[in-house]
């Protein structure tokens, strides 16, 4: 059986993950599809989120009654549908979904011994709080503690997943990320099958 390639998880809610995923996609890095690229008021250029990962993560979060304004870390449990999905793709790939901030323990346990690496997208905390208040109608005090909890969750991930931390305001962010991906064994590949992209006129249920 061939060795399975590494998987990179992008962390950081309301911290520039969509712009990073979009830039990596257009630079021919292997983002797993289907990708939700529909424009939204909060992200007019699209989220570039993997719809399968989003569905898996949402099911996990619903089970533990976690949500954007009430974040928390889930236990290390096995999710067989996730394992089956990952095993169908031997090569390295990148996954972006904000639920990963909270569900990464399931990914770690389910995908072991496959190599996981992470990218922690960071941003000014006040900007993140304002984004949570504006886009999720989260009261200011709750947004403050939500951001603190997200940071705690991602910091815990770094104990189990080799992770680079980059800031949205850093003009060298993309260069740092690409260098990190190369070290991890993930390279741009113009021949990588173009993932299905869900655009404004398509149905969100288009998934593999």
Image: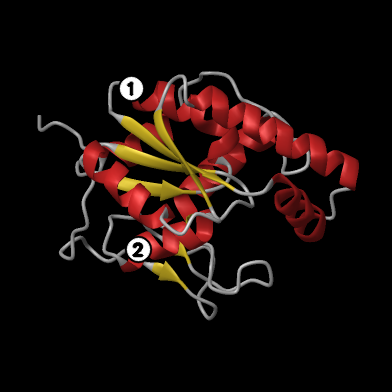
Name the residue at 46% across, 19% down: 159
Q: Which residue is mark 2?
A: 25
In the rendering, which numbered label is found on residue 1?
none
- Quadrant (top left, top right, bottom left, bottom right) of the N terminus: top left
Name the residue at 61% across, 28% down: 153
The answer for how far apart the CA atoms under marks 1 and 2 are is 26 Å
Crowdedness near tag 2: few (<14), some (14–19) or many (≥20) residues, C-alpha within 10 Å: some
- Residue 48 at least partly seen: no
- Circle 1 sits in a helix, a strand or a loop, which is it? loop
Left or right, 85 with respect to 168, comes to left
Classify 64 as above or below 187. Answer: above
Crowdedness near tag 1: few (<14), some (14–19) or many (≥20) residues, C-alpha within 10 Å: few
Front one among 152 and 103: 152
Could you say which quadrant of the image residue 145 lies in? top right
Where residue 10 appears, as percent x and y from the top left, is 46, 44
- Quadrant (top left, top right, bottom left, bottom right) of the C terminus: bottom left
In the rendering, which numbered label is found on residue 112?
1
Classify 79 as above or below 201. Answer: above
- Residue 191 at least partly seen: yes
Where residue 133 appears, as percent x and y from the top left, is 82, 54
Left or right, 68 with respect to 52, comes to right
Where residue 131 appears, as percent x and y from the top left, is 74, 56
Front one among 47 and 149: 149
Left or right, 139 with respect to 108, comes to right
Where residue 114 appears, as percent x and y from the top left, is 28, 27
Q: How many marks?
A: 2
Classify 65 as above or below 43. Answer: above
Nearer to us: label 1 or label 2: 2
| Of pointers 1 and 2, the one earlier in the residue sequence | 2
- Circle 2 sits in a helix, a strand or a loop, which is it? helix
């Amino acid at each position: 059986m061939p060795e399975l390639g590494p998987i990179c998880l992008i962390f950081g809610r309301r911290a520039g993950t969509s712009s990073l995923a979009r830039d990596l996609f257009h630079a021919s890095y292997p983002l797993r599809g289907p990708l939700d690229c529909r424009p939204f008021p909060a992200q007019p250029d699209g989220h570039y989120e993997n719809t399968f990962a989003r569905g898996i993560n949402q099911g996990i979060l619903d089970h533990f009654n976690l949500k954007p304004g009430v974040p928390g870390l889930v236990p290390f449990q096995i999710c067989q549908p996730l394992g089956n999905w990952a095993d169908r793709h031997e090569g390295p790939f990148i996954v972006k979904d904000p639920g990963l901030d909270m569900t990464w323990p399931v990914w770690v346990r389910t995908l072991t011994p496959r190599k996981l690496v992470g990218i922690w997208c960071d941003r000014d905390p006040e900007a993140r709080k304002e984004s949570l208040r504006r886009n999720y109608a989260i009261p200011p005090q709750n947004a403050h503690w939500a951001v603190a909890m997200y940071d705690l969750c991602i910091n815990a991930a770094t104990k189990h997943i080799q992770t680079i931390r980059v800031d949205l305001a850093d003009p060298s962010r993309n260069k740092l990320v690409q260098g990190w991906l190369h070290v991890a064994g993930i390279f741009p590949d113009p021949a990588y099958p173009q993932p299905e992209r869900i655009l404004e006129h398509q149905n969100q249920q288009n998934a593999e």
